[in-house]
Amino acid sequence: MSKQVRAIVIAGNGTNCERETAHACRLGGADVVDIVHISELLSGRALLQDYHFLNLAGGFLDGDDLGSAKAGANRLLHAPIKGSTEHLSEHLRKFIADGKLIMGVCNGFQLMVKMGLLPAFGGDFTQTATLTFNDNGRFEDRWVYLKADPASPCVFTRGLDGITLPVRHGEGKLVVDSEANLKKIEEKHLGVLKYCLPDYSATTMDYPLNPNGSTAAIAGLCDETGRLFGLMPHPEAYVHRTHHPRWTRETDLPEDGMGLWLYKNAVRFIRDELL
Ligand SMILES: NC(=O)CC[C@H](N)C(=O)O
């Protein structure tokens, strides 16, 4: 593989944020960004091993039937690759073992959690948490404030303190299967992004700042390596200052959108550690 940062964004079956996600990867500095339909991976025409950075984008996989991303998780875990004895899950396992990066946004985060990739306590693709219906039973479409945990191993949030991003989801409430696993998440600083007050001073369970009632106010989770990361808010929707709803009034907004920082961190990590 040449010295290029190569990102893949999976599309199809109801994903609808693949173009914005690819744009964010490009602005973040990735040299090659391919939008690949899931059927191309399942037919063996495209290979995960050709990339460093796997993006699972937002959308409505399978129309949210059976719960967001549940059917998609089964597809990725159990579908064989056409004409071969291998399953896509084996390619994914190798991708992770090679130290590469995965970011799941919204529906992509739901997919990672339902595949058991986050928080990844169950060993091999075993689900130990879920993302379920917002406490108010409604689809929430609003900007939220997020506090990053500086002690987290997450490579995507390095150097971040507080950021603001939009959410758009009906099933964003994280529920963990046991008190013991929730304790583990907290002790290992895996709940890396939490809904917080507008001044980023403290996390909150109060609606609407916490739009879904998520356990421990968790909006984003990483695994223990920090290389697998998912979040309900959409970083690809804030990659330029003018994406912010008050960009004409707030003069001190950074030139980059705050979501772009996550992609820049990913690309930096790949250049420093993987190329
Ligand atoms: N924007 C999204 O990815 C939405 C995810 C999912 N369809 C939900 O409503 O929760």
Image: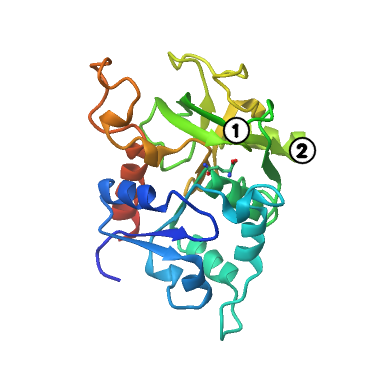
**Left or right: 145 in relation to 119:** left
Which quarter is ligand 1 in?
A: top right
Q: Residues within 10 Å of mark 2 (few under 14, many from 20)?
A: few
The quadrant of the rendering that contains the C terminus is bottom left
**Left or right: 26 in relation to 161:** left
Tell me which amino acid carries mark 2.
Ser
Tell me which amino acid carries mark 1.
Phe
For disc 2, the marked residue is 178
For label 1, being within 8 Å of ligand 1 is answered yes
**Farthest residue toward the bottom?**
83
The x and y percentages for residue 216 are: 64, 26
Q: Secondary structure at mark 2?
A: loop
Q: Residue at x 59, y 67 (%)?
A: 89
For disc 1, the marked residue is 139
Up the image or down, 259 lies above or below 216; here it is below
Q: Residue at x 25, y 50 (%)?
A: 29
Q: Secondary structure at mark 1?
A: loop
